[in-house]
């Protein structure tokens, strides 16, 4: 998919606000062999690209008739409404590796019969060539039992992918379920205090 852009003639906060009113997103294209270029991209076209290709999409951007292969480096958007404030696009040269984050997804979680599976780490930072970026990292957790855990070092990634996240970081852990009796015990401990207070009040 291609994204058409036009060079920005005006910069600044007011110009950016006007661009968004016109359904344009302020963006900048930069790279090792590409001078940083402020541009405007069509908001609807950019949203369609994200939906169809994902956050780590590699695509061509056309600026005044010239095509450049880019990857989305950063997206600044509103937390309250579907509005994009600014987009950073990294121009890619042949053979260049990029640093991106990919989602970590568990498979087989429904087969864990005892214990509660938690996932402290949801994304993995990796370095690879743009054409080798995996859509996600799948991890089979079906065999995990209470007390078991998986760290970044346990994850299997493609050979052409270098993991940058700390190898000792915990990704998945299975813990024993909390016993309901604990809440009952707390209630029993609290009860004598209430009785004592009532007794003092009667005196």
Image (cartoon, rainbow, N blue to C red):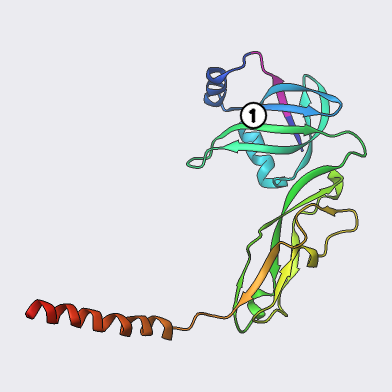
Q: Is residue 187 left or right of residue 13?
A: left
Main SS type for the magenta part? strand
User: Toward the viewer: 184 or 45?
Assistant: 184
Mark 1 = which residue? 42
Residue drawn at the location 68% of the way across and 38% of the way down: 74
Q: Is residue 41 left or right of residue 189?
A: right
Residue drawn at the location 10% of the way across and 76% of the way down: 201
- State yes or no: residue 8 in magenta: yes
Label 1: element kind:
strand
The residue stretch that appears in magenta: 4-9
Residue drawn at the location 66% of the way across and 34% of the way down: 45
Residue drawn at the location 82% of the way across and 65% of the way down: 156
Compared to residue 156, the image places residue 174 above or below, namely below
Q: Position of residue 54 (x, y in %)?
A: 70, 47
Q: Position of residue 24 (x, y in %)?
A: 60, 26
**Image quadrant where one finds the N terminus:** top right
- State yes or no: residue 194 in magenta: no
Q: Position of residue 73 (x, y in %)?
A: 72, 38
């Amino acid at each position: 998919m291609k994204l058409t852009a036009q060079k920005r003639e005006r910069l600044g906060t007011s110009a950016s606000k006007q661009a968004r009113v016109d359904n344009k997103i302020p963006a900048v294209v930069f790279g090792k062999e590409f001078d940083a270029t402020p541009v405007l991209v069509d908001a609807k076209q950019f949203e369609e690209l994200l939906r169809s290709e994902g956050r780590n999409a590699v695509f061509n951007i056309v600026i005044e008739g010239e095509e450049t292969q880019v990857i989305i480096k950063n997206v600044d958007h509103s937390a309250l409404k579907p509005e994009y404030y600014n987009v950073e696009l990294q121009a890619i040269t042949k053979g260049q590796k990029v640093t991106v984050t990919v989602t970590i997804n568990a498979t087989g979680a429904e087969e864990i019969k005892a214990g509660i599976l938690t996932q402290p780490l949801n994304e993995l930072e990796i370095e690879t060539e743009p054409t080798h970026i995996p859509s996600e990292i799948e991890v089979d957790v079906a065999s995990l039992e209470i007390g078991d855990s998986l760290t970044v070092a346990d994850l299997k990634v493609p050979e052409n992918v270098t993991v940058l996240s700390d190898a000792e970081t915990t990704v998945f852990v299975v813990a024993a379920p909390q016993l309901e009796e604990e809440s009952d015990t707390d209630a029993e401990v609290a009860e004598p205090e209430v009785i004592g207070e009532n007794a003092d009040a009667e005196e």
